[in-house]
Every structure is written in structure tokens, then in C-alpha cells.
């Protein structure tokens, strides 16, 4: 065979070998990419599945809370003063049953908060006196007056307040409703309200109480601390004694507030229930509902007023700081019946 022909053949074989190596490399890369994609999709699907299980578990916890609020015996009934209850390893609530988890449930009576529509100027002054505006007396006064102007039925301006003209002067496209607040988010619209103050106010105020006074027996420590005339030196002892009374089924102690309103949870009280489920595989879900006991004759015992999923910034019920609010732990088997 001529030398030039054999040289051509060797070159062709070399090219074919390089081509094969390139094809094998490409197939290897494609296979690796496909495997990685499949692993990612599997992880995503597993995450969605586990989150769905946590959501179902949290909803089961919500149903348990409603049942515990209907117990006739007040010593067995769950308290709505910010107390936390925990249910451990509730496999029975998961259809597949292969993953365990834990539920923490916290309840708040809206009568244990400051009602934006009923609080007088003294109570609002005490509230804002400990807000992020505590060092700005002038801004406090303006904001309180603006709240009063928002909720009243006239166009008369309180001193330092704000009615239609003041909102126009601030280049706002809305004006006070001149009627009671319908939601807490409406508070964001009040002239002078900033986001930091609004976020601080949220756990302390309500639009559902309908009472000018706070029910001290159902109030959290944070709410009690902003009330007028509260004896702060006795507050920690009161919260501790109240928790001990709940744990031991004893009458609740009197609040360290002169002429404080104290009453057990009423049938017509509105409550907020926060339920967090954490699975053993790390998935978690938090849901929150505002409920009110339904009128007789209704098919369900409670009327749902609001349903939401709190954001991560609101913190976890499983945080160590919340352990002091834990009243009782249950095993899931106690609810199987």
C-alpha cells in the first residue's frame, strides 16, 4: 500500500477515535446532567410532599384546638391567654403514617388585647408610650389623634389629628373612613403610621374585642405591660402564678392592675389560634385562624373570621423562648378517639 494512502487511513482512524471519545464524553455529560436534574426534581417533589403533610398536620391541630375549647370543664379547657399546648408524634393524623411530627398550638383571646375601636385616649397613650415612638411625644400625640379621627363618625379634627384635608395635604389618595377599623391592616393607612410601629402593635391590638377594657385574665404579658397603672414589679410574679394555677387547676390570681377586668373566656369571645407543625424530616407549616363560636343551629361549632399563613419573621412556636408558655404536652394517642 502506498505510503500516502496508509497515512490517510491512520489519520481517518485517529479522527474517528477522537469523534468517538467526544461522543462518549457528551453522553457522559448528558447522563450526569439528567441524573442531577432527576435528583433535584426528586428533592423538590419530596419537599412539596413533606410540606403538604405538615400543612395537614397543622390543620389537624387546629381542629383539636377547637375541640379543646368546647370542653365544659373549665379546668380541662384550653386557655387563650397566649398559652401553648404541644402534641407529640402525631402519626395518626398523617395518611401515610411514615413520618412523625409535633404540633404546638397557641391561643389568644381577642378580649385580652387592646381594641382599636373602643380604647380611650388614656389607654392609647399608655400603649404608644412604650412603642417605637416612646421618645417622640409629639408624634405619639399626632398618631393617637389620627386614630381617633379615623374611627369617629364626624369630620371634626382632634388636636394634632387628621381628617380629610390633612390626608390631601399629605398627597394621599384616600381619607379617613370615619367608622370603626374593620381590620388591623387598615391601621397602616392612618396618617403618621410607620411600618416598625405597626409591626410592634400587631400582637397587642385587635378589632374584634368590642370592649373598652382589656380582660387581664386573658391577656398576655406583653399586653399587660402596656396597660395604664400596671405594677410592673409584680407582673412577672403574676404571669408565673397564673401559669402555675393553670397547671394545677387552681383559680387564677388577680392581675396587678387596679380595677382590672378579669373574666373567664366567654362563649361569644373571638379567638386567634396559631398552629405550627414540625415534621421529623424538617418540614414545617404555620397557620393562623381567627374564630368565633357559632350561633346555635349552625353546622359547625365555630365561625371562621380570618385564615392566614404567618411569615417566618413572626418566629417559631418551638423557639426556646416559648417553652415558658408551654402548659401541657399530649401524646397523639390521647386524641385517637
Image (tube, grey):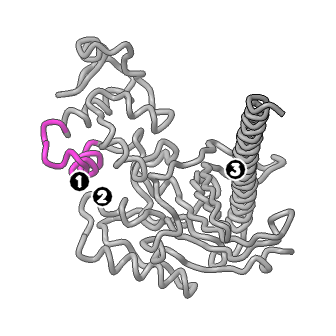
Residue ID at (26%, 37%): 144
Element under label 3?
helix
- In this figure, which residue is indicated by the disc labeled 2? 227
Residue 76 spot, x, y in % from top left:
66, 77
Element under label 2?
loop
* N-term-proximal mark, 3 vs 1: 3
Residue 165 spot, x, y in % from top left:
26, 12
When asked about the image quadrant of residue 224, the answer is: bottom left
Give the residue at the far front of this rendering.
2
Work out whether residue 67 can be spotted.
yes
- In this figure, which residue is indicated by the disc labeled 3? 36
When asked about the image quadrant of residue 94, the answer is: bottom right
Could you tell whether 316 is left or right of 91 in the image? left
**Structural crowding at the residue carrying mark 2, measured as other residues with C-alpha within 10 Å and reported as few (<14), some (14–19) or many (≥20):** many
Residue ID at (46%, 67%): 217
Residue 188 has which mark? none
Spatial separation of the CA atoms under disc 1 and disc 2: 10 Å
- In this figure, which residue is indicated by the disc labeled 1? 130
Residue 103 spot, x, y in % from top left:
65, 68
Between 179 and 323, the residue placed more toward the observer is 323
Residue 151 spot, x, y in % from top left:
39, 29
Could you tell whether 317 is left or right of 42 in the image? left
Quick one: quadrant of the N terminus? top right
When asked about the image quadrant of residue 304, the answer is: top right
Amino acid at each position: 500500500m502506498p505510503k500516502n494512502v496508509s497515512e490517510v487511513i491512520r489519520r481517518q482512524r485517529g479522527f474517528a477515535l477522537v469523534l468517538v471519545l467526544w461522543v462518549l464524553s457528551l453522553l457522559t455529560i448528558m447522563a450526569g446532567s439528567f441524573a442531577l436534574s432527576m435528583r433535584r426534581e426528586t428533592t423538590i417533589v419530596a419537599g412539596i410532599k413533606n410540606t403538604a403533610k405538615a400543612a395537614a398536620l397543622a390543620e389537624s391541630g387546629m381542629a383539636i384546638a377547637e375541640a379543646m375549647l368546647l370542653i365544659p370543664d373549665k379546668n380541662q379547657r384550653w386557655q387563650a391567654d397566649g398559652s401553648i399546648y404541644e402534641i407529640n408524634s402525631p402519626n395518626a393524623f398523617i395518611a401515610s403514617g411514615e413520618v412523625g411530627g409535633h404540633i404546638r398550638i397557641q391561643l389568644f383571646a381577642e378580649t385580652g388585647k387592646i381594641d382599636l375601636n373602643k380604647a380611650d385616649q388614656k389607654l392609647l397613650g399608655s400603649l404608644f408610650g412604650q412603642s417605637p415612638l416612646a421618645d417622640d411625644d409629639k408624634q405619639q400625640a399626632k398618631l393617637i389623634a389620627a386614630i381617633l379621627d379615623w374611627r369617629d363618625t364626624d369630620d371634626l379634627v382632634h388636636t394634632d389629628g387628621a381628617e380629610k384635608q390633612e390626608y390631601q395635604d399629605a398627597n394621599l389618595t384616600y381619607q379617613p373612613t370615619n367608622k370603626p377599623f374593620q381590620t388591623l391592616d387598615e391601621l397602616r393607612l392612618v396618617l403618621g403610621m410607620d411600618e416598625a410601629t405597626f409591626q410592634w402593635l400587631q400582637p397587642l391590638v385587635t378589632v374584634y374585642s368590642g370592649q373598652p377594657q382589656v380582660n387581664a385574665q386573658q391577656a398576655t404579658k406583653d399586653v399587660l405591660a402596656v396597660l395604664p397603672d400596671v405594677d410592673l414589679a409584680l407582673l412577672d410574679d403574676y404571669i408565673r402564678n397564673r401559669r402555675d394555677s393553670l397547671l394545677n387547676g387552681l383559680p387564677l390570681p388577680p392581675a396587678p392592675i387596679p380595677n382590672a377586668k378579669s373574666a373567664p373566656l366567654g362563649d361569644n369571645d373571638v379567638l386567634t389560634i396559631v398552629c405550627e407543625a414540625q415534621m421529623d424530616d424538617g418540614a414545617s407549616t404555620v397557620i393562623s385562624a381567627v374564630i368565633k363560636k357559632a350561633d346555635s343551629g349552625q353546622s359547625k361549632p365555630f365561625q371562621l373570621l380570618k385564615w392566614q399563613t404567618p411569615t417566618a419573621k413572626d418566629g417559631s412556636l418551638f423557639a426556646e423562648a416559648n417553652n415558658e408558655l408551654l402548659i401541657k404536652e399530649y401524646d397523639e394517642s390521647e386524641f385517637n378517639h
